[in-house]
Amino acid sequence: MEAFFSFCLVFGVGSLGYFAFRLLHIPNPALLGAMAATGALNIAGCYPVFDTGFVSFVANVTIGIMLGRQIDRNLLRRLRILARPVLLQVVGMLTLSLACGVAMHLMYSNASVPTALISGAAGGITEMAVFAMSIDADAAVVVFIQLFRVVIFLFLIPCLSIVAEKIEKTSPKIFAKKGKRAEEYRKAEARSSSCGKKFGKKDYALLTVLAFAGAIIGIRLEIPTGAMLGAMFGCGLFSVFINKNYFFDDRLRNIAQIGLGLVMGQRMKPQIVSQLSALFFPAMVVTVVMLTGCVLLAFFLYRTTPWDLTTCLLCSAPAGMSQIVTFADEIGVDPFTAAAFHTVRNVGIVSLYPWLVMPFTS
């Protein structure tokens, strides 16, 4: 009972951090706000003692269910026509993530190789934090670098889109290209807009069972971030099999991220806070490397696909998919293409990147 009250106390502090960060419009407020608030509690020596293992497991499964929603027949239909550029983009992002990780390790020698490699990954803040905690990497450093990059990219994306539009208008000969498959892409978009039926109550019950079963199997097989990946693929494959789409309440995502935040907050130490000021220069270097690589990837997409330069930039930007798709819709850019690229990139990096990092953990 004492452990339960301790959990409620810490979760309440984490929730206050979430609301504070949301008011400040900080990206990913649930995870970061909870981590900051409970981390401050831990540094002050007021963090009550209780086992966070179960909290971490349930949060991982919930995040896995959220990610699994992206895997459905709608996505598979998209990939039939977008397979080649999407595959090249995933390979490019994985390579770029490793390059940023190497740059991070060279600039910040206090970070272990796994911590540096995870910090440089073009994945989501939550997903990379989960991976960092699963191998005992420095999750605070990972989150700081990831947050720094996301904030910079979200600030620069509107500016880059304006520049791209002007470049295309002022230099039509230099940026001229052939759009042989434009009509084919548009037909694929029309076909992909038709979704399967929605989940019923029995479907959700079975989905939950499969999520936890997949998580347990992933852990037993010692797969990196096995709980999250097991739940993700279990839910995604079930959705594909029955050809139905399930709804995931954002409140569940926030609760799961607060749970992860309080687990990370338990690991916050005073020496970590003292190290953060030394991370600004490495964070800037990693961001510059990522930005340069993403612009080159965008230009390559532009030369090999029928899309305009702005669309290619949005497809290559390593920021949150919801922000990218919303911005694409606001400026009249094809959100279908941007969503497909970011979905596959996120699933690809979450699934494949841990295997690239694991050899450096021994």
Image: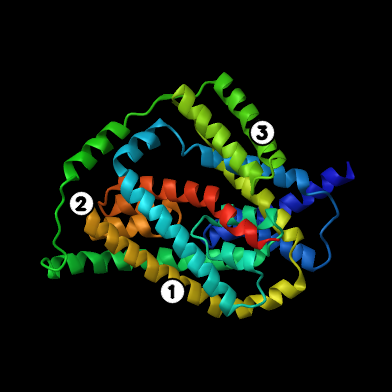
Q: Residue at x 43, y 46 (%)?
A: 344
In the rendered view, tell whether residue 102 sits above or below residue 281. above
Residue 147 in sight here? yes
Say whether disc 3 or disc 1 marks the residue closer to the N-terminus.
3
Give the x, y percent position of residue 180.
15, 47
Q: In 3D space, how far apart are the residues under numbered discs 3 and 2 (Cα atoms)?
A: 42 Å
What SS does tag 3 mark?
A: helix
Query: Would you say the residues marked 3 and 1 are in contact, meaning their CB atoms lie under 8 Å apart?
Result: no
**Left or right: residue 160 compared with residue 353:** left
Q: In 3D space, how far apart are the residues under numbered discs 1 and 2 (Cα atoms)?
A: 27 Å
Q: In 3D space, how far apart are the residues under numbered discs 3 and 1 (Cα atoms)?
A: 39 Å
What SS does tag 2 mark?
A: loop
Quadrant placement of the C terminus: bottom right
What SS does tag 1 mark?
A: helix
Q: Residues within 10 Å of mark 3 (few under 14, many from 20)?
A: many
Residue tagged by mark 2?
Answer: 306
Q: Residue furthest left?
A: 173
Identify the amino acid type marked 1.
Val
Residue tagged by mark 3?
Answer: 212
Instruction: State the image quarter where residue 89 is shown.
Output: bottom left
In the rendered view, tell whether residue 46 sits above or below residue 104. above
Residue tagged by mark 1?
Answer: 288
Identify the amino acid type marked 3.
Phe
Q: Residue at x 32, y 47 (%)?
A: 84
Q: Residues within 10 Å of mark 2 (few under 14, many from 20)?
A: some
> 109 or 258: nearer the eye?
109
Give the x, y percent position of residue 42.
78, 63
